Image (cartoon, rainbow, N blue to C red):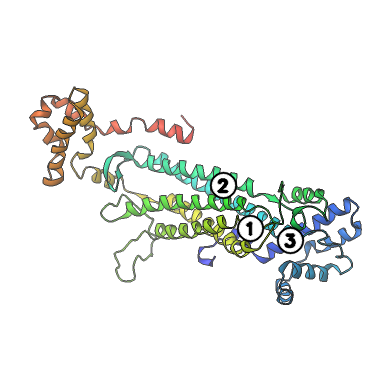
Amino acid sequence: MIPRYSRPEMVKIWSPETKFRIWFEIEAHALDAMADLGVVPRENAQAVWKARDVEFDVARIDEIEAVTHHDVIAFLTHLAEIVGAEEARFVHQGMTSSDVLDTCFNIQLTRAADILIDDIQALLAALKRRAYEHKDTLRIGRSHGIHAEPTTMGLTFARFYAEMDRNLRRLRTARTEIATGAISGAVGTFANIDPRVEEHVCKKLGLSPEPISTQVIPRDRHAAFFSALAITASSIENIAIEIRHMQRTEVLEAEEFFAKGQKGSSAMPHKRNPVLSENLTGLARLVRSAVIPALENVALWHERDISHSSVERNIGPDATVTLDFALARLTGLVDKLVIYPENMLANMNRFRGLVMSQRVLLALTQKGVSREDAYRLVQRNAMKVWEEGKDFRTELLNDADVRAVLDEDEINEKFDLGYHTKHVDRIFARVFGED
């Protein structure tokens, strides 16, 4: 991913230096296990650990790979240059390249998941704070983009909190599922390496042994992992879209923080655009783009092919780096989002009580009017608001058919905004698990 949308901690996971360090640890721990089993001399295993504090020469490995056309062999050759050819004689014994590549990839994904889990927890904290801050801040709810009935800004934040909390659970599950390793040798039969080597390496590296591998770890695990990232990205876009709509000039119920000295447009000095939210929409598309290739990687030829390899070298870093950046950006956006309660109230009252139509409809049916007739009575007054700019309550009070059923006090009571917020505390208790 380009530096513009990257954060250092996540980028480091995917650096060549980190990758080669993990490869080394896999090989060294495997040798330790083989020494414990008496398969290789203990001194050879110990000698390889001399490279523990050595910084591998990425340029040298690339130079060797230019000749061998094999990245793992290039690394093993460089490792032998460091520790000595004789000392490195038993490195990679009984193993195949995928033992190193797949186990390393899953370690990288697991570490990436740990960062993303922290990211989501930070976002949840911001959403919860804003939800309680605006628990009772009234705003109009919209369906199809059209005024529906009153809600609160706090409920909007709480809804996003609940969605992101589900993503947190999905990502934790995906982390557990991806945290497996395989040191099973060619076609996964352990013919040339003891299964206890795999168990030792996985234990040392914080993984679980893959129950059954071919020559690769099954890719349904990876498909589930990238799907979890994609769903999280879609939730990011869900929040970003809401903010973009709220910041529209005609709405202006909320606005991205606009810093001193910030410029909104090269041509129009008055502009304050929702650029962060729009950026998040674009980043979400990138993360989601990893899903189809990850799903297609599940079907490989027989015990192994490498059609998945080029895909994963791209989507592994790109999807995790992008999602990490997007989550951090969204957290800052939510934390500093400027809310305009007065505009929310003004927008809700723009159509002079029209949004209370359902309450009047229900009141008429409760007084014995058929639903069809009640709907007709309410709609004919509502249309006067839409088409003639009338006041909904006034029209109802002047409608003889409505007044034959509801008196003035009963009509006025239907315009009490508190009616729509009476269960907010109960919803909050469901979402946040608090009284």
Q: Which residue bears the numbered disc 1?
A: 300
Image side of residue 353 versus residue 156, left or right: left
Q: Give how far apart the Cα atoms at labels 3 and 1 are.
A: 24 Å
Which residue type carries mark 1? Leu
Q: Which residue bears the numbered disc 3?
A: 23
Residue at (34%, 61%) from the top-left corner?
273
Mark 2 or mark 3, earlier in chain: 3
Q: Give how far apart the Cα atoms at labels 2 and 3 are.
A: 25 Å
Mark 1 or mark 2, earlier in chain: 2
Q: Which residue bears the numbered disc 2?
A: 171
Examine the rendering and report whether any part of residue 336 can be seen: no
Residue at (15%, 34%) from the top-left corner?
376
Residue at (49%, 50%) from the top-left corner?
231
Image side of residue 140 versus residue 7, left or right: left
Q: Position of residue 400 (x, y in %)?
A: 8, 29
Q: Position of residue 70 (x, y in %)?
A: 72, 70
Q: Secondary structure at mark 1?
A: loop
Say whether marks 2 and 3 touch (CB < 8 Å): no
Image side of residue 207 versus residue 403, left or right: right
Mark nearest the camera among 3 and 1 is 1
Which residue type carries mark 2? Leu
Mark 3 or mark 1, earlier in chain: 3
Say whether marks 1 and 2 touch (CB < 8 Å): no
Image side of residue 55 versus residue 295, left or right: right
